[in-house]
Each structure stands twice: as structure tokens, then as C-alpha cells.
Image (spheres, grey):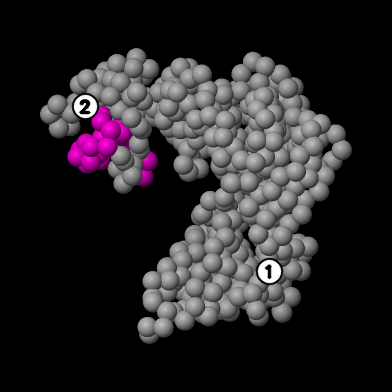
Amino acid sequence: MSLWTAEEAAAATGGTAYGNWAVDGVSIDTRTIAPGDLFVALKAARDGHEFVAQALEKGAGAALVSRDPSEFPEGAPLLVVPDVLKGLEDLGRAARARTKAEIVAVTGSVGKTTTKEMLRTVLSAFGPTHAAEASYNNHWGVPLTLARMPVDCEYAVIEIGMNAPGEIAPLTKMARPNVAVITTVAEVHLEAFGVVEGIAREKAAIFEGLEWGGTAILPCDLEVSPILERAARGAGRIITVGDKKGAGARARGVTLSDSATVVQGQVLGAPILFKLDAPGRHLAHNGLTVLAVTQALGRDLARAAMALASWQPMDGRGRRERLVLNATDDQAIELIDDAFNASPASVAASLEVLSAAAPKGKGRRVAVLGDMLEMGPEAAQKHADLAGLPAMQGVDLVCTSGALMEHLDAALPVDKRGVHTANAEEMAKVLPGLLWPGDVVLIKSSKGSKLSLAVDVLRKLGQANAAVPKGNH
């Protein structure tokens, strides 16, 4: 079954189809486009119309454009609309209207992508499940995820993000979730919102799109939880998640080891014990949230907990791996790649994971931290305050990168202070030479700080040395 026929897409968008085509997917990037995809010529850093011919050469089934057909190769399969982004939004709404799937929408300052991936893993145990392969959670990412939704899927997980006020409401109204989730509210995007209460109100807008009788799932342990609860009053049901007595999904005990998290708790009165194949107290709450979703959907809790054990962290979000940094295999380190997102709350959670890690031999627990972005006027102090986090006591060495992280470097005790670099490029150059055999290395930063460059360098060294036959050098 095709995802979209020319007739269906034209009806959904009010556009004009040229050619009798059918497509199996939707793409906005010629670098990753697959044969049979509908290429959407969005305008971003460059105008997607410049790449239509290339997309068709690569086998695109058609292109969604807003220019005269005469500007494209003769006979090109096209869908012409007045505005390409609106056309994509219309496709997304039509996909939502035709599906019989249960829709789960997820937002939160921290943990929304991890929760989305956990939900993908768990719901796939119950039926065909659709979710974006990346963090497609903005004004084009949400309609793109919806437009890609297979007709026959039974579940779909839609991640919804924001950078400024007023962004979540139209996206959740497009997704119309049966279950809407807020993972947490933290000090992220303070430049746009000023105070955390403003962030809470924006996150709570996800409940505006809930289908009639739908379920709202939200944290109950936060100072701003009352804001979230008030916003969710129109939901058919509210399930709270947290540690305190009375939480619908409650963690009674969380045990962290070097490589796992074991959670004992209850979900809507049912006792539950589950294991995650990664350490992190924050992951325990993500897992409880996922189990709350499965309960809201009427699915078996024990089966969901078993499926949750097979979830693995994504690159940039806490994935752990062993890397060999020299050809003799005597300088292996363990890397914790968490270089996609950073806020005071998420840095604290990542440092707790690092402090629970078990270095090999004479190895150390090494934190490599890059700037936390969009922290507002108190950004310098928030970086310095990281030195006082309880988990910092278990860290042996802290290397910092960026102008804001210089404030943390200055606040650290001398015995914990490692190298400080002005930028990620410099850190990527010097980091390999600073590491010892057996080190456990956390790399944590906002995506815009580009500390993933240091991750890439370490991985390339590990891959190069893994390819060298041992004993033949």
C-alpha cells in the first residue's frame, strides 16, 4: 500500500498533481532521500526548489513544490501548492485524520526524545508503531512525522518541542494525541521565557490538543507541577509521575549500577519492577512515564516492562561504548556520549551516571562539559553552580569548553580542574592526549556547543585502532 497517491495528496493539500504517481515516504533532504519518496521543497538555509531535479534523479516519486511546473524537468511528477510548508502541514493533518492509530505526543525540557524512543520500543511489542527517527519536533518536524505515518500503523509517537512562546499549541492541535506527556520542566530556553514558570505554561499547552477523553501524563514532584495540573484539567484522565506518595506512577526505589537502572515502583496501584540497560535516575522516571502511557492505552503492564528492558540509548543521549585509543589495546576507555542537550538538570543527571560508573584499573571518572545554551542573564552563575552539584564529588577530573564553561572551571577545586578550551574544536584536538587507560569519559553539552566533535574524534580513533590486527605492528 502506497503512503500517498497523487489523488490523495492533491485532495489533502488542495494542490494540483502533475502525473499519476504514488509515493512510499516523505523526505526533505536529498542526502537521505530514498527511491519512491515525496520530496518536499522546504525553504530553510537554502531553498529546496534548487534540489528538486537532484531528488528526482535519485528516484523521488514526486516533489511538493510552489513554483510553476515549467521550471522543472518536462513531465516531472509534481504536487504544486501555494506554500510548501502549509502543504506539508495539510498532509500531516490528513494523515492524522485517516489513521486509526493511538497517538501519543511527548514534550518536556529534558528527556522527550529518550521517552519517545522508549515508547517506540515498548509499543512495538503491541503492534506496528511509527515515530520519527530523529528529534523532528518543530514546526516542520511534527507535520513531517505525521505525513510519514503509515496508514496501517496502530501506534504513533509524536515528539513536540519549542524554542519560543506559542509554538506547542498549534503542533499539538495538529497531532491531536490520545495521550499527551510532559516529561519534566527545567531551566531550558530561559532567554525566551525568562522564568521556569513561563516554560511550564508553554509545555502545558500540549494538553490543548488532547482528543476528547484523552489522558494527560505529567510530573508531580516539581515546583511548577501545579501549573501543569491546572492546564490538564480538561483531560479525561490525569496520571502523575514521580517519587512522592500519591503519584499515579511512583518510583519507590531506584538502584543505579555501572551499566543498569533497576526500578521498583507502582503504576496505578499495580506493583512493578523493571530494569533499564543504562544507568540514570532520570531514566527511571522516563521508564515510569512510558509504563503510565501503556496503562492509559489499556495494554499489559508486565509485557511493557519486559519490552522496556530492550531499549538502548541513542547517540548523543547517554549511549555508552568502549573505545580503544591505541593499536596495542592497552588504552581502552568507556565513552558516555551525551553531547546533544544540556541544562543544569540534565548535567546533574549525567554527572550522577558518571559518578556511579566503575573505571577499569587506574582509570578515572572524567567529565568533559560544554556550554549550556539559552540560559538567560544568569547563565554565568548557572555554569559556576555546577561545581556544587552532589554528583560532582564522585568525578575525578572536569574538562570544560566554551566561554560559559570557563565560569565552572574557575569554581572547581584545583584537584578536579582539567583543561579548559575556548571551543569544541580545540577540545577535540587535546582530549585524546589527556585520557588514561580505564577512564570513563562523559561528554555533555548543548548541541550548539558542538562538543560532539570530540565524540567524533574519539570514535574515529577507536575505529581506526579496532581495524589494526593485534600483534602486527
Residue on which the image places disc 2: 77
Q: Residue at x 24, y 23 (%)?
A: 21
Queried whether the magenta region covers residue 116, the answer comes back as: no
Kind of residue at badge 1:
Ala
Query: Which of the two marks, 1 or 2, is nearer to us in this view?
Result: 1
For the point 51% across and 62% down, the residue is 451
Taking the image as shown, residue 18 lies to the left or right of residue 338, namely left
Residue 199 makes an appearance in the image: no
Mark 2 secondary-structure assignment: loop
What mark, if any, has residue 425 been given in the picture? none
Of residues 115 and 410, the one drawn nearer to the viewer in this rendering:
115
Nearer the observer, 186 or 238: 238
Q: x, y (%) of residue 286?
A: 67, 43
Residue stretch in magenta: 35-62
Q: 225 above or below 367?
A: above
Residue 315 in the image: x percent, y percent?
A: 51, 54
Q: In which quarter of the image is residue 149?
A: top left
Q: Which amino acid does label 2 sit on?
A: Pro
Q: Which residue is drawn at 69% across and 48% down?
A: 275
Helix, strand, or loop for circle 1? loop
| Residue in view at x 68 percent, y 60 percent | 353
The image quadrant that residue 359 belongs to is bottom right
Q: Provide residue 442's location: percent of width, then percent of height.
A: 60, 64
Name the residue tied to disc 1.
358
Q: In which quarter of the image is the C terminus?
A: bottom left
Q: How many labels does the image show?
A: 2
Image location of residue 408, percent across then percent down: 67, 67
Quadrant of residue 94 in the image? top left
* Residue 472 visible, this angle: yes
